[in-house]
Every structure is written in structure tokens, then in C-alpha cells.
Image (tube, rainbow, N blue to C red):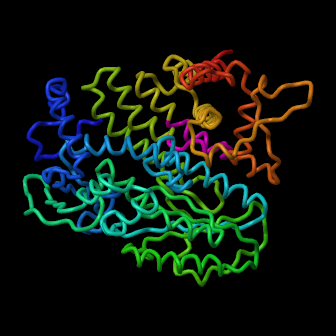
């Protein structure tokens, strides 16, 4: 666990970890006694709130732009982790959580969510449909959860009863908070609702709370994807098709949210329509929707445009990375080479690699701008001039060029999907190849390549490009025994393609 605790901790988290061999028996006794009795010590239920801006650049004078992060005692997080490790196998074995809920689950991430949503939208527009994507915004969702409703979900949907249910009742009972900013602190106040953000169980409990929401989307045959309280729904529509099912779905969603003490923020809800590639057909009439149509939206940190060219996202990434480089130039004189490279990976490489699997097939101009970021960063790190050829520099640093990093991410998801290390909604996009009688698919480890209608857009879908890239790999890479071996072989393979002359 991360050594993060609460300002009220008597023993700092880092010191607690160091003395754990001495105090472990006492900690074990506290946790076991709590689980057996179904009672949580009251000191574990007091949180210190630290307001953090949801996004950089927001107005700090508007309190709605802050996210209240609960800092709980470190020992309470240890107890929550013990409960989390027991309840998650139960949820996974019985498929309690929604298939398309990617928030805070093993093998799930914002990147896997991007791959699935982007894949579905690409294939739908490739078939000639317009796709309406609505990014639903819930106002202070974690803070308005009703404890009685959540306890009912835990009992009826999850199957928690007896002393385990008593433990959760105690978990919600008599919670308190106080707000602290710098050296100022507010008086303690009761917290009769909500799940604490910043806790171990908070995000999981919220995912359980909104399980019935997925049933509404399925009722109206609306595609959706959830990441904790971030909810996106998308539906393909042909020209002149009625959007009444979408309107009915949104109306029922609002009613359900109201009944469960959640609120849909129409003002912050974003709406975009993706158009078919090269199609002159008119889009359906969306005037009945209460949301303003946007040309670009931000989807879990990725900017998507109506043409799916990803140019706005690339522009934002270039701007952000060069801004970080300018900031790092001030630290360069006081950092040694190893620490500077670590900092570069944290602030630059992480941005280049974030959800880069959906950038496959973008224009050469956009790709060259991303490569410019990496080239400039390499020169910055190695103190080489602009006239020196960049390929030997990248080779010495063992940095794969951007287009190979994109392929690396795609193939990494393929390997995970084939080995049970990816969400089911990613694995179902891949189909093993069934060859003729003279060959055995188990020996080849190939994937079926689906047909696509439009090569300029359809080939960018994960379900299309991933099998092609996978089948082009040497057999010894495809049959890697572990993910570590696969990464090593794949890096060596791409490195030879990039720098061997």
C-alpha cells in the first residue's frame, strides 16, 4: 500500500511500515476483532478533507470545481484493504459488477475503456452510421450516495449478510469529517451520506451502488461504458432514424438518478456526433436533446473530434509536453542524468504513451508532431544539437519511436486478452484463427482478421488492426510464456526494426 495516511495519524504511515514487524500482531488483532464483531472503531471513521481541483486551469474560486479527497487513518485503510481483498473475488466469481464498469478493477483501466469505445465507434461509422456519444456528468456523485440504498444493494445484489453486513452498517454509521487547508481547519461535522473519495472501498461501493443503471441502458439497447462515476453512452444511427429510444433512455436514467439521490448535470454533460467517413448523408435530428452539440469532447483525458482524426488530442499533447519540457529545463542544472531521465518519463513519456493504442492509423503529419516531442526530449536529455541525426540518439537511449510505441501498446493488450489479463470486453474483440485441416491453430497462435468496409477508417479499429499486427509477429514472440518475456521479446523485435540498418 502507498504510505498515505491522515494528518491526525499518531504514527506516520512511513514509520508504521517500518515498525510493522513489531506491531503486526496487535494490528491483526484489531482487524480480526472488527470483522468478527461487525464494529469499526470510531477513530477509523473520521476523515480530513483536502479539496483538490478536478482539472488544472479551473477557477479555484468556484467550489464546484473541487473534488473532496478524504484522508483517512492509515490503519483504517489497512482494514479496508483486507475487506476489499475478500469481497473482490466474490464479485468476480459471480459477475456482480457490470461488465462495462472499468473503474478501479483489476485488468481494467481508462485505456481499456478507450479501446473498446473507440473500436465500437470506428466500426459503426465504417458501416455508414452516425454515432451519438453522450458524456453524462453526475454532480458530486460520491458525496450523495444514500447509505440505506447502498446497504440494500450489498444485501440483495451482492449477497452480503450477517456479521459482514453489520460491519458495513458500522462502516457508514457515525462518520465525520473536517476540512483542512494549509494550517486552517474546520470543526468536525457529521457525514450521514456519501462514500469517501480517497478510501479503498469508496470507489467499489459506488460501482455497486449504480449497478442498476446498466440495466436501463440494456433495456433500450444503448451502448455504454462506465468508469466509476464517469458515464458515456453511445448509439449508432442511420440517416433519418428516430432518436426517440435515446430520449426515452435519458428520461428513465434521470428518473432513476433522482430516485437514488443522484443528479445529472445537464450543463456539464457533453454531446458529440461522429460522422461516417466520406458519407454525404444527413445526420439524424438531435434538436430534441437538451445538450449542446460539441465538435470535440474530452473522454477520460482523450480529446475526440467528430472526424476521429485525433488532431485536437495531438495538438493538446504537443502543447502539454513542451510546457513540461520548459519546466524541466529549470530543474536540469540540479538533477543528475538518472534522475532527469526518470523525471522525463514521468512528465513526458507517460503523456506520449497514455492511451496511444487509439492513435493507430492517424495521419503522418500528426504522428510526426508526436515524434518531434520525443526527438526534442532526447536531445534535451543528452545535450545534443539539432543538426545531429536523431536515430543514433534514440538507439542509445533504447527509446522506441512513437509509431512503434503505439504498436507495442496494441500488441500488449492482445497478449493480455489472450492470457486472461484483460477485461472480457477486450478479449471478445479477438477471435482465434481456425486454419485448414493441414495446420493446427494451437501451433500458429494466429488471430482471425475480420473484414472491414472502409480501409481508411475501419483498419484503425482494435478488432481489425490488432490481429494484423499480431499475425505479423514471429512465432517465438506470440508463444511467450509470460507477459515479462513477451515485453522483452517485443521490445527487442521492434528495436531491431527501428535501429538496425
Quadrant assignment, res 51: bottom left
- Judging depth in this view, the residue of 234 and 83 nearest the camera is 83
Vertical side of 418 occupied by 204: above or below: below
Give the magenta range. Answer: 354-373
The answer to whether 103 appears left or right of 202 in the picture is: right
The answer to whether 14 appears left or right of 291 in the picture is: left
Query: Magenta-highlighted stretch: main secondary structure?
Result: helix
Position of the N terminus, as image quadrant, is top left
Vertical side of 451 occupied by 350: above or below: above
Question: Residue at 27% across / 54% down in the picture?
Answer: 167
| Location of residue 347 in the rendering, given as x and y in whole percent from the top left corner | 39, 38
- Judging depth in this view, the residue of 59 and 373 nearest the camera is 59
Question: Residue at 20% across / 55% down in the picture?
Answer: 50
The answer to whether 447 appears left or right of 332 in the picture is: right
| Location of residue 279 in the rendering, given as x and y in whole percent from the top left corner | 78, 66
Seen from this angle, which residue lies furthest bottom? 288
Quadrant assignment, res 17: top left
Position of the C terminus, as image quadrant, is top right
- Judging depth in this view, the residue of 483 and 382 nearest the camera is 483
| Location of residue 399 in the rendering, given as x and y in whole percent from the top left corner | 52, 25
Vertical side of 23 occupied by 465: above or below: below
Residue 369 painted magenta: yes
Amino acid at each position: 500500500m502507498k504510505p498515505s495516511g491522515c494528518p491526525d495519524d499518531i504514527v506516520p504511515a512511513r514509520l508504521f511500515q517500518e515498525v510493522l514487524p513489531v506491531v503486526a500482531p496487535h494490528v491483526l488483532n484489531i482487524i480480526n476483532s472488527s470483522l468478527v464483531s461487525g464494529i469499526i472503531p470510531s477513530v477509523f471513521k473520521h476523515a480530513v478533507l483536502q479539496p483538490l481541483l478536478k482539472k488544472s486551469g479551473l477557477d479555484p474560486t468556484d467550489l464546484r470545481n473541487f473534488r473532496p479527497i478524504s484522508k483517512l487513518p492509515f490503519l483504517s485503510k489497512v482494514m479496508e484493504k483486507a475487506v476489499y481483498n475478500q469481497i473482490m473475488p466474490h464479485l468476480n466469481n459471480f459477475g456482480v459488477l457490470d461488465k462495462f464498469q472499468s473503474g478501479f478493477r483489476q485488468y481494467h483501466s481508462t485505456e481499456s475503456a478507450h479501446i473498446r469505445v473507440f473500436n465500437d465507434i470506428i466500426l459503426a461509422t465504417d458501416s455508414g452510421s452516425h454515432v451519438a456519444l453522450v458524456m453524462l456528468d453526475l454532480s458530486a456523485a460520491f458525496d450523495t450516495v444514500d447509505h440505506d440504498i447502498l446497504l440494500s444493494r450489498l444485501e440483495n445484489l451482492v449477497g452480503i449478510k450477517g456479521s459482514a453486513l453489520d460491519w458495513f452498517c458500522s462502516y457508514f454509521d457515525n462518520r465525520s469529517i473536517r476540512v483542512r487547508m494549509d494550517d486552517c481547519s474546520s470543526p468536525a461535522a457529521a457525514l450521514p451520506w456519501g462514500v469517501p473519495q480517497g478510501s479503498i472501498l469508496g470507489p467499489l461501493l459506488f460501482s455497486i451502488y449504480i449497478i442498476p443503471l446498466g440495466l436501463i441502458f440494456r433495456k433500450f439497447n444503448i451502448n455504454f461504458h462506465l468508469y466509476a462515476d464517469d458515464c458515456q453512452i453511445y448509439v449508432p444511427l442511420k440517416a433519418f432514424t428516430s432518436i426517440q429510444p435515446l430520449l426515452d433512455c435519458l428520461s428513465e436514467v434521470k428518473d432513476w438518478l433522482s430516485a437514488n439521490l443522484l443528479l445529472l448535470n445537464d450543463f456539464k454533460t457533453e454531446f458529440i456526433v461522429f460522422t461516417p467517413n466520406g458519407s454525404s448523408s444527413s445526420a439524424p435530428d438531435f434538436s430534441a436533446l437538451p445538450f449542446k452539440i460539441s465538435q470535440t469532447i474530452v473522454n477520460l483525458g482523450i480529446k475526440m473530434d467528430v472526424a476521429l482524426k485525433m488532431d485536437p488530442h495531438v495538438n493538446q499533447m504537443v502543447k502539454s509536453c513542451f510546457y513540461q519540457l520548459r519546466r524541466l529545463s529549470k530543474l536540469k542544472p540540479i538533477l543528475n542524468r538518472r534522475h532527469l531521465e526518470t523525471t522525463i518519463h514521468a512528465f513526458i513519456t507517460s503523456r506520449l504513451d497514455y492511451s496511444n493504442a487509439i492513435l493507430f492509423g492517424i495521419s503522418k503529419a500528426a504522428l510526426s508532431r508526436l515524434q518531434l516531442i520525443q526527438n526534442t526530449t532526447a536531445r534535451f536529455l543528452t545535450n545534443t544539437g539539432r543538426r545531429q541525426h536523431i536515430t543514433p540518439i534514440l538507439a542509445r537511449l533504447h527509446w522506441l519511436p512513437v509509431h512503434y510505441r503505439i504498436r507495442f501498446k496494441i500488441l500488449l493488450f492482445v497478449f493480455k486478452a489472450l492470457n486472461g489479463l484483460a477485461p472480457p470486453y477486450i478479449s471478445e474483440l479477438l477471435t482465434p484463427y481456425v486454419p485448414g485441416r493441414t495446420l493446427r491453430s494451437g501451433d500458429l497462435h494466429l488471430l482471425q482478421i475480420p473484414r472491414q468496409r472502409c480501409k481508411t477508417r475501419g483498419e484503425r479499429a482494435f478488432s481489425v488492426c490488432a490481429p494484423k499486427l499480431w499475425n505479423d509477429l514471429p512465432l517465438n514472440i506470440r508463444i511467450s510464456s509470460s507477459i515479462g518475456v513477451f515485453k522483452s521479446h517485443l521490445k527487442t523485435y521492434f528495436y531491431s526494426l527501428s535501429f538496425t540498418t
